Amino acid sequence: MQLTGQNFIGSSNSASSSETFRAINPATKDLLEPSFYEATADEVNEAVERASKAFGVYRQKSGEEIAEFLESIGDEIMALGDGMIQRCMDESGLPEGRLTGERSRTVNQLKLFADVLRDGSWVDARIDTGEPDVRSMQKALGPVGVFGASNFPLAFSVAGGDTASALAAGCPIVVKAHPSHPGTCEWVAEAIIKAAKKTGMPDGVFSMVHGRSHDTGLAIVRHPKIKAVGFTGSYVGGKALFDEANRRAEPIPVYAEMGSTNPVFVLPGALKERKQAIAEELSSSICLGVGQFCTKPGLVFHEESDDATSFTSFLTQKMQQITAGVMLNEGIRKGYQSGLTKLSGINGVEILARGEEDENGFRGSAALFKMPVLVYLENIEVEEEVFGPSTVLVSSAGKKDTLNAARKLKGHLTATIHGTEKDLEEYSELIDILEQKVGRLLFNGYPTGVRVSHAMIHGGPFPATTNSRTTSVGTQAIYRFTRPVCFQGFPDSYLPDELKNDNPLKILRLLNGSYTRDRL
Amino acid sequence: MQLTGQNFIGSSNSASSSETFRAINPATKDLLEPSFYEATADEVNEAVERASKAFGVYRQKSGEEIAEFLESIGDEIMALGDGMIQRCMDESGLPEGRLTGERSRTVNQLKLFADVLRDGSWVDARIDTGEPDVRSMQKALGPVGVFGASNFPLAFSVAGGDTASALAAGCPIVVKAHPSHPGTCEWVAEAIIKAAKKTGMPDGVFSMVHGRSHDTGLAIVRHPKIKAVGFTGSYVGGKALFDEANRRAEPIPVYAEMGSTNPVFVLPGALKERKQAIAEELSSSICLGVGQFCTKPGLVFHEESDDATSFTSFLTQKMQQITAGVMLNEGIRKGYQSGLTKLSGINGVEILARGEEDENGFRGSAALFKMPVLVYLENIEVEEEVFGPSTVLVSSAGKKDTLNAARKLKGHLTATIHGTEKDLEEYSELIDILEQKVGRLLFNGYPTGVRVSHAMIHGGPFPATTNSRTTSVGTQAIYRFTRPVCFQGFPDSYLPDELKNDNPLKILRLLNGSYTRDRL
């Protein structure tokens, strides 16, 4: 496929701006062809207008029809073949194996939502007969703005989680392409447009606009016909969109996943039994993908002991051995360096590992810091995410300090406890504290893998996200883009199929307070 | 019971302010005894701190324990007897029959949530076995601020909908008593405190503070330990709390139900068949409770015809016959008068009925306006709620104008269609348009009754509410005060009962994508 650099306004390509930009290969700092056209205000407006028009048709599509659309997107992405993967490697610096794996994840995610739509019970149909007869179900919100992340150029980008859940919910989308991988975005956009045509979806169900400047994104969020926004990225970016959305004449929900420091608590029994294994596994988790995961463990709490000393030296050795890796782009690399500089400057911090800076491309080296819990508590910035292959060991004298530090945590995507059964018995309060702080609580695992499934929660209290009551991974994400609508006293034939007496879709419904797939 | 005028800081009474106020009988303008003490900043702070402390205990209570607490609140409210009803009549001007009915509704609402807790399936337990094993469920958010409405001194006040759903979710509450009926609030607060003690709930699970000034409410919303807010009232009040909550260092959700104009569409066939009945029933709905319902029909769209002319004159007659009624307070009466003055001043409006002003107490008279759809579309303020017994007839030349007016509606709590089967066939597009505008769509009914049940949605797009994805009436309201938490790789014995392998609570769970009450 020949890249054009154009915007996708529905199925029409458009390039009316004189402002262009090019992607940069982060491994070499080379500029990549072609130039991409920043979307103009008119182009953004036209994309949203088409989405709004498409909504009238798309919201009437059956679960089966949308399931076929989602699966077709998956097929078309696979059909892009190596060309897309190669472009994605050039733009992201990520290795081939990681990207083919991420492509599978992206396609499987679309299929999982297709399964949910085919079952149909997700709409939470409720029927209360009697006087008056009231029936309710979830319905699509309207056009959604989707902002992809740089660190998952496939799974959290043009055809990523927010796209899958918004399209599954019945919402057309306008995607803001990530300027770090605009060519990959174009490949995937082509696949979605093809799938939309093949499965008879209305023009405007998908659009994608380019833009390095914040104006493009703000124009999407400000448009009166956009009804919700999904975002994955930095705190500064997500919070800005959230604030903008709340300033609108009609405020809309912004689901921003803004990263996290993902505290890990290594309890005494676990340290005794598995110090070397944990050190090895933890260093892999910290440095996976050059530490560029929002679930990277960035804080490791433990209590001082001989075992802790050994654990620390195992981890230090491991972290020292890791060679510099290519980071996603210059901004992320600069951010990482300045995060390390900030941590290094804290009074009372020990620098256990810090690789050499490497100017060959945008590279980042592993780093390991250590500080006593009192220093940690006095420097609240240590809890902020440093995006890259680093972590901070926080050591305390005993259980009281550990629990105290846990109590003072802000919101995070995950927290992890490493322990024995005996540890859990002794630290049961820790579970209780941490489940109030995070979206996902792990035992004897590592947070960097996020399973795409029904029970997964990838979210958490602010500042991890702007809305703790939802998830951006897993099938529950569909509810971010719906709202309940109640029908009172309607003749059966004018009710949606989901609410009709004879339950033609055979979905699970709450009928007068009891769950059943029976007809009335 | 002797009223004290004090604040309830958990189970302690407190009255440290020198600022006091008294309730006013709206039927007589008499000041009522005793004086109520405005809560100080310290009192508000202490109430939230106790709620936060109580949360640690309350969130561990089983569904059965909380169900008993909710039922006990209902029993204690009934045990208050006539004294509470009498005080409520004095403070609200509402008649005895209405208030005993509202008391039943309030008690039944608490019982319905108790039923939901006993079944337990509401937590949306999800289990995905395999690698890794992930399990999620809804958990309580934390302390909730509750702002009651003046127009439902029982069902949307101290023990009203938000209280029932927040307590059911596992959240302690701090209620801001409505200054229009502070004595009723004290009666009900006493009942809740008694129930909390009887059923062994922690001190601080319920607090209530008085305040006429906005500062009391703002102090609740600003407190870092408040995690969500429920509000029923005016657009100005609700939007102010919403904005304040979004300005916090940690933004929190504000569920504000801010009223609505509840458009009614009377289609040609219905007009032909039932013009007199609709005129009679509609006038009753408009004037029920002196028009002081957020679901009062305030806009009636119809198309010009001989039937429409008869309908209009029937409705005019009915509205002219209605005598002035006592409104809730001086502010509401003034707001109603100024709303009528605004409508009367619109160029092109016809005033079909407008009762005499009556200075005997705070009384409001029925009013009926009529304007062509073009005048309506040019005066956007006509779509704003006028709180009181008035409505605006909007006449158009035909279907095109009707659909056009529907398309331009903002968000409302409800919309209603009166029609025959043939009307529905011809106006099927109207259903499609209206379901995008409201939380509840009625056919051949009247919006003023809101059934408390599983399927009810009392909500809708902005500006009807600040969060269209929830309801403030019915059992789905519980999800306003919870968020999902995911447990990964946890030993069975440390999982919540809802997620344990053998499903000890026998709840419905989504197990590897299938709904079942079976154990693993």
Image (cartoon, coloured by chain):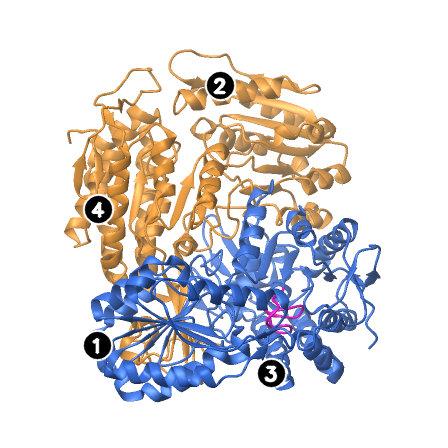
Chain colours: A blue, B orange
Cα gap from disc 3 to disc 1, whole angstroms: 38 Å
Q: Residue, x 65% and y 49% (percent of image)? A: B431
Cα gap from disc 2 to disc 4, whole angstroms: 37 Å
Do marks 2 and 1 both belong to one polypeptide chain?
Answer: no
**What type is the residue that disc 2 sits on?**
Ser
Crowding at dot 4, Cα within 10 Å, few <14 / some 14-19 / many 20+, comes out as: some
- Quadrant (top left/top right/bottom left/bottom right) for the N terminus of chain A: bottom right
Relative side of A198 to A512, left or right: right
**What type is the residue that disc 4 sits on?**
Asp
Q: Is residue A440 magenta?
A: no
Cα gap from disc 4 to disc 3, whole angstroms: 61 Å
Q: Compared to A252, does B446 lie above or below?
A: above
| Stretch in magenta | A148-161
Look at the image and tell me whether residue A478 can be seen: yes
- Under circle 2, the secondary element is loop
Residue A451 x/y as whole percent: 50, 77
Mark 4 or mark 1, whichever is nearer to me: 1
The tag earlier along the polypeptide, 2 or 4, is 4
For residue A98, the mark is 3
For residue A425, the mark is 1
Look at the image and tell me whether residue B441 can be seen: no
Do marks 2 and 4 both belong to one polypeptide chain?
Answer: yes
